[in-house]
Amino acid sequence: MMYSSRRKPVLYFKEERRFLSAKCTVYKLFGLCMVLLLVSLFWLQLSCSGDVYGDRYPVQQPPPPPCLRADSPASPVDDPSWGPHKLALIVPFRERFDELLVFVPFMHTFLNKKKIRHKIVVINQVDHYRFNRASLINVGYLESGNDTDYLAMHDVDLLPLNDALDYGFPEEGPFHVASPELHPLYHYKTYVGGILLLTKKHYHLCNGMSNRFWGWGREDDEFYRRLRKAELQLFRPSGITTGYKTFLHIHDSAWRKRDQKRVASQKQEQFKVDPEGGLTNLRYQVESRQELTISGAPCTVINTKLECDQDQTPWCVLA
């Protein structure tokens, strides 16, 4: 049985509009305002309780962050009794704060429920070059600290909806959580994007990811070749029956366009293997580091300026 690969959440609600007659009296206007106020309060109550989300989340409903209760106790940040391993959840990021407000509290709650020790590290690109997801993940690996021993390369717009998904320590080899059989959009066999778990030892063995991929896409495909070259066995989930409904993809492509332009020699270079680049030739500066709490969920935001050698990768800027 095939599932639809285009299942997306409803992002807008229809609103009924009523127009007033030109002959309405002051009393009628006052009465209508009171009705609208009561309807607004009722709508706000439904939003906070989660009822307005209907069947958008068929497996597990992520909590809408604007309506979290102020008196709700914060869930544990780190409980050593959960095991010896700790996950660094690396989020390559730029400007998508609406998605981050949903992602951080959702993932913190999800991982705590599974008793996964973790910290969420958001690598925020603040330079003027094109977005470079791979380089930001390399920065996350280097800046995540010695208190973590494995990492998740995690897109900010992808939320796991099935509690059976495994975020535990991938001791035997890299574990691709968002496998092609489950990801709502990408289904080719060599796909390793979205959510990928690796031990820090294995990530170092691959020399991280290539820094040559400015703009959106292709860095995951190059990393797949690195996994093969390092002779690491790739694992994917089994026994998951929710198909393409396993994740919620919250990116609105109509509102936020991806940078898919290919300029200069980038069209040819994007399909080549980068045999030497990675952690060894990464150049960046940490502008600042901030500890934030979003709806009771902690995260670290590392504002980062990447550096670009325009002789090597002139496509890091758009002419």
Image (tube, rainbow, N blue to C red):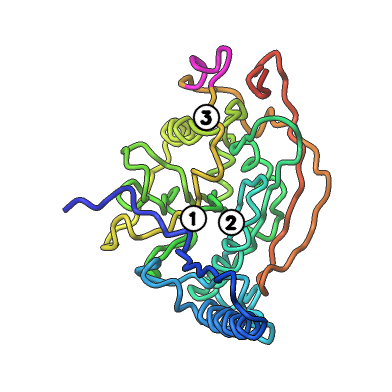
Question: Which residue has dot 1 on it?
Answer: 250
Mark 1 vs mark 3, CA separation in Å = 19 Å
Specify start and end residues of the magenta stretch as a single range.
262-270
Foreground of the two, 82 or 29: 29
Quarter of image, res 74: bottom right
Which comes sooner in the sequence, label 2 or label 3?
2
Foreground of the two, 7 or 240: 7
Task: Describe residue 300's horizontal placement relative to residue 243 as left or right.
Answer: right
The magenta stretch spans residue 185 = no
Quarter of image, res 146: bottom right
Question: Which residue has dot 3 on it?
Answer: 260
Instruction: Determine the secondary structure under disc 2.
Output: helix
Q: Which residue is pictured at 63% across the width and 20% down the height?
A: 315
Mark 2 vs mark 1, CA separation in Å = 7 Å
- The amino acid marked with disc number 3 is Gln
Quarter of image, res 73: bottom right
Question: Which residue has dot 2 on it?
Answer: 99
- The amino acid marked with disc number 2 is Glu
Considering every residue shown, the one lying at the far right of the view is 287
Q: Which residue is pictured at 50% across the width and 70% down the height?
A: 18
Which comes sooner in the sequence, label 1 or label 3?
1
- The amino acid marked with disc number 1 is Ile
